[in-house]
Image (cartoon, rainbow, N blue to C red):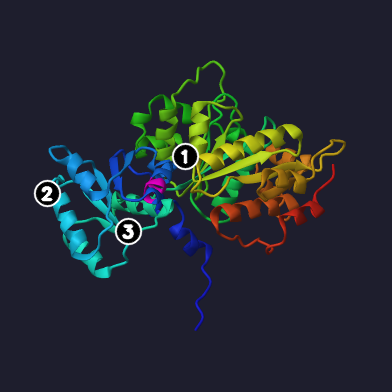
Amino acid sequence: MAAKPPTVETQVDSFGAAPHERPVPRISIHAFCEFPDTGAALQRAGADRRLSKAHLQVQLGGVNAAIEHYTGQITPNLLIVETKLDGKDALGELDRLAEVCDPATKVIVVGRVNDVELYRELMRRGASEYLVAPLEPLQLIEVISGLYLDPGATPIGRVVAVVGARGGSGSSTISHNIGWCIAEELHINTTIVDLDLAFGTVGLDFNDEASQGVADALAAPERLDDVLLDRLLLKRGDHLSLFTAPAALERDYDSVPESYEAVIDAVRQTTPCVILDIPHGWHPWIRNTLLAADDVVIVATPDLTSLRNAKNIIELVKNARPNDKPPRLVINQVGMPKRPEIPSKDFAETMGIDPAAIIAFDPQLFGQAANNGQMVIELSPKAPVSEALRRLCRALTGRTTGNDRGSASIFSFLKGKKQA
């Protein structure tokens, strides 16, 4: 008997960051490798965002170098050693290493032999893991993260950072609409975080304002527990919460990057999906937030300035996050009358990535939605723009909505764009 397809409710049970995607805590990791390829894989893993808090040192020499180094010295939180030996010879070498290891140190052994008996004996003697080279960075990240994952820990949410390639690209409107769609149509608990403290519009777009919000949390991130966070968030229905910006100019907003990181971490501890509305600009906290997010969405208009800026952001993010999927590109305001624009296919080809959505220029629909304090899908569920937004949400979540119309080419949405 064929299994029934999962419903929306059963799909969302597993939504959020996977266990191995949790950031590794601030630990020290020392690695002693026998072969350069193992050292290179470790270096690439150490550059990953999930290991950004850990302190990694890699050197050649294998088990013998580790024994010599730690004789009379304190061993790190995690020790990774590579051996060229197998069987009893490998066990004898590692027994000598155990004599200089502190009891609290976790040990990962890397070998070149796929030997089940060796694996079992290493586990019996207290090794944390045995890996067979050659290694992949993501494999190392998953193993290291798993060693420090509390089995009883609450799952954390996935963070989606949405940023505009230029001012006026519509990234805030897109972020609010996809947040609403994920919450209301996919029934995934979602929080939209407005990080444009001086000019944020999440309150306006949802026809609501709050006296407290993100700025208050950034001012004292160490106080942001579940109780305070619940008081600062605005609830919109069963699945959507808003973390609004003050949009006031009489205040100074000079929080350090660590404050932004702490606030985002606190939100993702309580919400499966976190949408970050990031203002157009370039500050250390913006760069850090983009590089730390699980998904990055770049919203660009089809003009030369957006082309240049989007390409620069995409290249920076891809180079800094080699183990992650590339950023997702949204081409917005396509088909504006009397405006010369770069064709979407040419724009995408220059970026080197296919667009996740192409949003047609429809000032009447977007303007009416903004004036009503509604989202576009609420106002016009069957409009081509609504279909494009659903497609983007599907790409971000891997979930489907009841309104999806199949898997037509992304460029087919241009056929139904509304000319104003």
Q: Which residues fall within the magenta stretch?
A: 38-42
**Percent position (x, y) of residue 119?**
25, 64
Q: Residue at x 12, y 38 (%)?
A: 72
In the rendered image, which residue does mark 2 sit on?
99
Q: Residue at x 32, y 53 (%)?
A: 146
Whichever of callouts 3 and 1 sits on the residue coming sooner in the sequence is: 3
Is residue 352 visible in this depiction of the protein?
yes
Image-based side of 346 in relation to 406, left or right: right
From what the image shows, is residue 1 above or below residue 78? below
* Residue 131: numbered disc: 3
Can you say which quadrant of the picture contains the C terminus?
top right
* Residue 222: numbered disc: none
In the rendered image, which residue does mark 1 sit on?
292
Residue 71: image quadrant is top left
Q: Residue furthest right?
A: 338
Disc 1 secondary structure class: helix
Mark 3: give few (<14), some (14-19) or many (20+) Cα within 10 Å. some
What is the distance, in whole Å, between disc 2 and disc 1 at their CAs?
A: 39 Å
Which of 167/54 is in front?
54
